[in-house]
Image (cartoon, coloured by chain):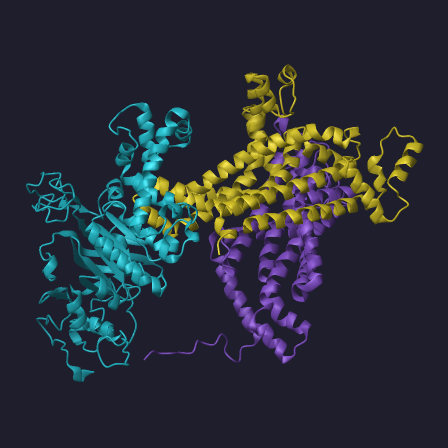
Amino acid sequence: MTAPATNLQKTDAPVVASVRDLRVHFKSKAGIVHAVDGVDFDVRDGETLGLVGETGCGKSVTARSFLRLVPMPPGIPVSGSIMFHPRQRCTACDGAGCVACDHTGRVVSTCPACSGTGCSTCEQTGAETLDLLTIPERDLRSIRGNRIAMIFQDPGKALNPALSIRKQVAEVFYAHRSDELLASAGIDPSSHSLPTGLLRRRATQQSRTLENVLLSLPPLRSRRSAITAAADDRVAAALAETQIPNPRAVMDRYPHELSGGMKQRVMIALALACDPDLLIADEPTTALDVTVQARIIELIKELQQRHKTAVVYISHDLSLVRRVADRTAVMYAGRIVEVGDSEQIFHEPEHPYTRGLIDAIPGAHHERGRLAAIEGTVPELIDPDPSCRFAGRCDFAAEVCWTRDPALEPVGDRQVACFIHHPPEHGEAPTFDRTAR
Amino acid sequence: MQIRDYILRRLIVLPFLIVGVSIIVFGLTRIGGSPVAIYLSHEMSSEEVAEIEARFHLDEPVPVQYAYWARGVFQGDLGWSGVAAAPVTAVFPNKLAATMELAVASAVVAVSLGIGLGTYAGARRNKLPDHITRIISISGAAMPLFWFAIVMLIVFWVYLGWFPIGRSTPEVFASISHPTGLYTVDALLAGNFKAFRDAIWHLVLPAITLGYGATAIIARMMRSSLVEELQEEYVDAARAKGLAERLVLRRHARRNALMPTVTVIGLSFGFLLQGTIVAEIIFRWPGLGRWMADSVLRGDRATIMAYVLFTSVLFLVVNLVVDVVYAYLDRRVVLGS
Amino acid sequence: MSTTSTSPPLTTSHESAFRVRLRRMGETSGRVLSNPTTLGGLVIIVVMVGMAVLAPWLVEPNTPNASQMPRDWGAIAVPPGSPGHLLGTTNTGGDVLYGVIWGARTSLRLSLIVVTVTVAIGVAVGSLAGFRGGRLDEILMRIVDVFLSIPELIFALAIAAVLGPSFRNIILALAIVFWVKYARIMRAQVMHVKQNDYVDASRVIGDSSWNIFRKDVLPNSITPVVVQATLDMGNIVLVGATLSFIGLAEAGLAEWGVLVSEGQAGISGGRWWASTFPGLMVFLWALAFNLLGDGIRDVLDPKTETR
């Protein structure tokens, strides 16, 4: 089931999340759009997985599926699973890093059904396993922003224009760290008294209007401000981590008062605030100025290493992904066509589509000055026929490519979905015969 | 900084608009009959009439006459109301209090119900509550208030007998003094719960009826802007933080959806103001609107002039306030870029 | 490399401009009517207008003045379903059915006259201001601003009151109040269209201002005016009926607002019908034109949201 190990450094790393046969379709007037149509891949602890493909290939839908953010309707969940194995702080070293936790400071959460001995719930692994596509909304909320966080393409649109930065970042702490906030404010979270109840509801953002009135009265007021102050401290610390200068001043700004790069730093601070196991970065630099892009990429990388977070990095830019990702998955028309070590893929692409993509990078591979483009356009995703999606644009397509659908199968250290590498049992197999060109 | 310029600009335009309105109102007095008639009462002698004609310089050119009239208005001289058999300014405050009590109550109904309905429907797009709200909001714009009010009376007063008609029960009215003229406030000041309940009881039906149209306008705007906001990326980003759907809706989407709704609230105030005329006739509410209607029928021009001038100024001021609030709420409008 | 194709021509060469316009109108109305609520609105309108036009054949007209309610002093305040009075009669023996049907005629007359006059004035003033610009524009728009400062019902009420109570004066008052909106809409449209390249092109060719306006600007500016006029067909009846309800029309006129006012006296005695039926007609009339107007706007101008 698990993809073969490729990157030597990450060989032993356990899987954080595994996507299996993910299919997300959309209802449209013309028919059913197969936006994501059978996607499989794993994300390992601490690694960066690049997810590359052209616009409309389904990479954003795949990414949003992790947090169940695909709007339904028009989206239709068809099949598949995203199994997530959350981590928890290593108790032996309290997150400092020790032998027990392989110096990551974190260990796999044990399966609550069998306490780690192995049972049917966890498929005998003993690790807590959650299917992100089916867990109840309530459980999903405790994962979102906490164990799995997301950075969006355009920070100008992902930040609420009407709320200050302080409020938007603080929300994460109120949602996931309310006990810590109460403790910092000197309130015993386990107490069951009425004032604590009111304050706890405040710290979890559940207060109604009347409760807010009560909280603003003298006996509770100081403790309420203590909670706010505790949240503010954390907001400032989170902002400082993304190298935002003068975080206390930025906190009171509104999104429109900040530059694009600053806004994306705020988004990153917000995403990493709860130390997530997995970060989904959906084209995090596409909307930014070129000059800012490099710094944001560096920042994500640096923070990833510090937080030991796994990252799924989505981009249409293969050369960028090569720089940031340990492994790369290439997507085409709702499918993964090739997965493997980024450097290997870049130097020896196995799938014809990957070849085309690399050829299209100016000055990257072949003769200088020649800019190749893949001919044709992305195929119709509405009710597709059983065929290789790329056949229409492929230089090497044989008859079998038009009648059957290649599966993603191992080729050396990699996985490729192409009949060139997995000749069909019947019929003529396509080859990399350059004369055909 | 620009926000101050914006408000300043609006404030400068305001007096010009008011002068413009006053010219129209003065123009109306010139249609048919002498404008001086608005200062005349039945028991005046011919000398007194002559004295008034001299005071307003009827032999002078029209612009000069306007100046004298405007000066009179400015000094609080709005003429003689034949209907009330008293100077307009003497009757005005009491009638105004009655109308304001009704208008404010309807505004409260319309704003809270409109925003509530709009939010409820927008968050449940294309489901049953949305369809019901759509019917309410489409019918609201086309609803003749004079008919709706009568239907409400037939149902709730004639057949069910749940609500009374008029503004108060005579015994209750006599039991307390009325320093403000707002019966609910007066009852609270007197600490008389029975009087307070009586005032509220009389207020409910006309306030809901009058507020229906404005509710519809506000609900419709709120619904469509909420639907729009819910498609914005920051809503998904808020969900990605792990916020409860209630918070995503209230703190994030609704806050932004309220901004365009605020401007509509200003417009629907005009709707409310107009509606008081009809509502006061049908519910026997002794306010400005009913006085205006009586004056219209009896040709009491002083009252008509005063009423038009007053409501227009009020309408202008309310819209100015709304625009300023909007500019403050939506910082992007003025401060951004 | 990439395939570049020329976009298909909007018209085939032998098709005249007139036929193109006709064909487009056909397509547009098809799209407008594909919406069930819009279609519902149109059906109501057809029924109402049919009632107005066929009134003399539906109910025998009152002689000598058909627009005046007939009085049956032998059947005062009879309930609906009574012989000869299907919808009952008022306190003064007026047949409610007569009022409902002839009221449609009155309303159609009112709305057609007022819309025609106000659109003509508004489009003329708005075009002049927008097309000429400068000082004239400034003056005209300030006048428009002042007119818009007075709530429309109150304004119309004051004018009609000063002119004296009669249905003719209601028409006049509504005309004075309603032209302003069109002037503002038209000006904004003309200002917008004026900046288009094809207007400059015509100018370069040396077309006269009037020709440019007639051929290029006017046809491209008129859409929002059409939408507003449709909505106002309903609004005018709504405001007009309110004025006559208050008492500004002649007593005894076969008009919905007058009838509601007349029936008002009976409601405390449980005689609900004399007010309810004519008021319902006003509601349906305004509703129908609102639905149609919204439908037209959705198709012609998809940017502006409704509903």
Residue pictured at 53% horizontal, 57% vertical: C296
**Residue A373 horizontal/vertical position (percent):** 28, 76
A304 on left or right of A205: left
Measured as percent of width and height from the top left, residue B316 is found at 64, 44
The residue lying furthest to the bottom in this view is A435
Would residue C302 be seen by someone viewing this image from the given angle? yes
Give the quadrant of residue B92: top right
In the image, residue A377 sits, relative to residue A327, either above or below, namely: below
For the N terminus of chain A, which image quadrant? bottom left
Colour displayed for chain C in the image of the structure: purple
Compared across the picture, whether A5 is left or right of B295 comes to: left
In this orientation, does residue B221 appear?
Answer: no
In the picture, the quarter occupied by the C terminus of chain A is bottom left
Residue C190: quarter of image:
bottom right
Q: Residue B304, image x and y in percent?
A: 74, 38
A79, above or below A431, in the image: above
Rendered view: A423 above or below B182: below
How many tags in the picture?
Answer: 0
Identify by letter the chain in cyan. Answer: A
Where is residue A340 drawn, in percent x and y?
Answer: 15, 64
Task: State the residue at coordinates (19%, 73%).
Answer: A352
Residue positioned most to the front: A246
Q: Which chain is yellow?
A: B
Which residue lies at the image location 34% right of the left edge and 65% below the top edge?
Answer: A290
Q: Determine whether, in the image, residue C39 is placed left or right of residue A322.
A: right
